[in-house]
Amino acid sequence: MNQVSRMGFLCALATGAVQIYMAGENTSDRTLAAAGHAFSSFPAIAIWVAGLASIIASVGYSKRISRLPASLLQSVKTLGSMTYPLYLLHFAIGVQLLDWLTALGTAPLPALALAIAIVCAMSLAVCKWGEPPIRGALRGFLDRLGQRAAGFRAKEYRV
């Protein structure tokens, strides 16, 4: 890793950690602190740093990783496919679930565990059963649109 890459990585770490800390403080005011519990952004920051480290490791050890069993690689691929739905759902739905569960009287840690489990299950459902049909339909639509555009250009330039 060269000097520019190291600086970029450190800036990404710092920026991400600050953003997670600020979002966590806002969430804490509404949920865990309201239930009388202290909140620490450390677990969320640690998970985020571990994710960045795994991305860097996957690039550095790609040849070794490709020799792992196919079932393990498929599981990792599924987890990777879940990341974008998880990104979309974790804050919008996860925070609301956490608010709702704590308002119902669920203790904060079980409420957090349940909210995480529900959001992860929703992310898996989106990546397995939601995205593929939409992706197929969109790909077919764009292929037909591209064929029409190519035919239109071919007719337009004929002499």
Image (cartoon, rainbow, N blue to C red):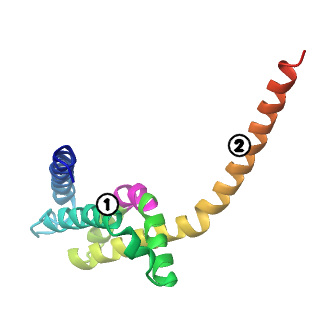
How many numbered marks have been drawn onto this rendered protein structure? Answer: 2
In primary-sequence order, the first of circles 1 and 2 is: 1
Please state if 120 lies on the left or on the right of 33 as rendered: right
Q: Position of residue 71 (x, y in %)?
A: 51, 84
Q: Position of residue 73 (x, y in %)?
A: 47, 77
Q: Residue at x 38, y 76 (%)?
A: 64
Question: Which residue is labeled 1 in the image?
Answer: 95
Query: Which quadrant holds residue 72?
Result: bottom left
Q: Residue at x 11, y 69 (%)?
A: 36
Query: Which quadrant holds residue 89?
Result: bottom left
Q: Residue at x 74, y 44 (%)?
A: 143
Q: Amino acid at mark 2?
A: Leu
Please state if 65 lies on the left or on the right of 19 as rendered: right
Q: Judge whether residue 107 can be spotted in this image.
A: no
Q: Is residue 8 above or below residue 129?
A: above
Secondary structure predominantly adopted by residues drawn in magenta? helix
6, 104: nearer the viewer: 6
Q: Judge whether residue 73 can be spotted in this image.
A: yes
Question: Which residue is labeled 2 in the image?
Answer: 142
140, 34: nearer the viewer: 140
Do tag 1 and tag 2 residues touch (Cβ < 8 Å)? no
Q: Position of residue 153 (x, y in %)?
A: 80, 25
- Start-end of magenta stretch: 85-93
> Is 113 included in the stretch rendered in magenta?
no
Query: Which quadrant: the C terminus?
Result: top right
